[in-house]
Amino acid sequence: MRKIYIKALMNERGISIIGTIFTLIILGVLGTALVAMVSMDQESRMRSIKREYSFYAVQAGFEYALREIKEGGYPLAQNKALDDASFTNALDCASRKITVVGSSDDTSKTHSITTSQVSSDCLTINTAGASVGGASGNEIHGLVLTKTCLNAVTVDQITLVWTPEAGETVRLVRIGGVDVYDDFTGVASGVPVDITDTKITGSSSIDYIRFSSGISGTSVTMTCTMSDSCTKSATFNLP
């Protein structure tokens, strides 16, 4: 009888151990699942926060671009850093479309708007007084740059194309009494002249453009490239 009791007791203990192990397994599975759920929820929250950062970066990019265009600044930007995000701006001058990509880590948002004005809408090149000057007829005089809208327009390159062309180069450009380009070697027809950035807030006379040799009797096209990458051109004939 004692043996039977001991055997029953051992069976009960075995069942109890199995039950405990099974309970621990279930608790472990539930704990793992709970950790996974918390981790997924945290990841989802972080993605949502990054999307918000990207959205606000896009808004910041638009504000930056519009302000820079208005003030004759530099609206184009590449990965311009904010606290928790960055933005990249692009401008299509023909359509006046500003496109901004806002990014936060691996999350990004892209949006475009159309602005009413870019620099090329607000710059005129007055060629009515264009003439030949200089001791050897190697200078263009009488050109005027005028801002007609926005607060300012900044010119950072001037490209001159002239025909007939006989190997002349542009050596010096003076605007408003300041030499914005001065290089004895000069640049050839069709090559951009990288001038010192010149902000136009009203009217500015191009005192002269000096060439390596005479420029009389040519047809000249002058293209101004502004700080927002837009361009404005004018063609005139020299006597």
Image (tube, rainbow, N blue to C red):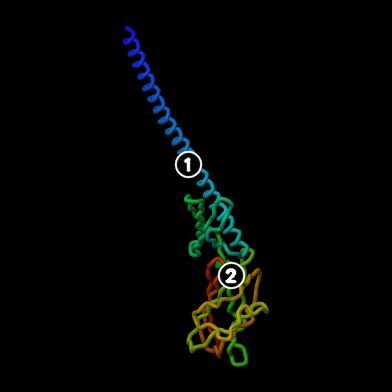
Say above or below: 154 vs 211.
above
Is label 2 in a helix, a strand or a loop? strand
Question: Camera-side residue: 132 or 99?
Answer: 99
Is label 1 in a helix, a strand or a loop? helix
Q: Is residue 201 left or right of residue 51?
A: right
| Sequence order check, earlier mark of 1 and 2 | 1
Seen as rendered, the residue at the extreme front is 2
Quadrant hosting residue 138: bottom right
Q: CA distance from mark 1 to mark 2?
A: 51 Å
Instruction: Report which residue position mark 2 lands on.
Output: 123
Q: Residue, x 55% and y 78% (percent of image)?
A: 193
Seen as rendered, the residue at the extreme top is 1
Say above or below: 120 vs 105.
below
Is the residue marked by circle 1 packed among few (<14), some (14-19), or many (20+) residues within 10 Å?
Answer: few
Quadrant hosting residue 185: bottom right
Is the residue marked by circle 2 packed among few (<14), some (14-19), or many (20+) residues within 10 Å?
Answer: many
- Checking the image for residue 231, the label placed there is none
Residue 61 coordinates in the image, percent (x, y): 55, 55
Q: Is residue 146 left or right of residue 97?
A: right
Q: Is residue 91 left or right of residue 5?
A: right
Q: Residue, x 63% and y 70% (percent of image)?
A: 199
**Hey, what amino acid is under mark 2?**
Leu
**Hey, what amino acid is under mark 1?**
Glu
Image quarter where the N terminus lies is: top left
Residue 161 coordinates in the image, percent (x, y): 50, 81
Image quarter where the C terminus lies is: bottom right
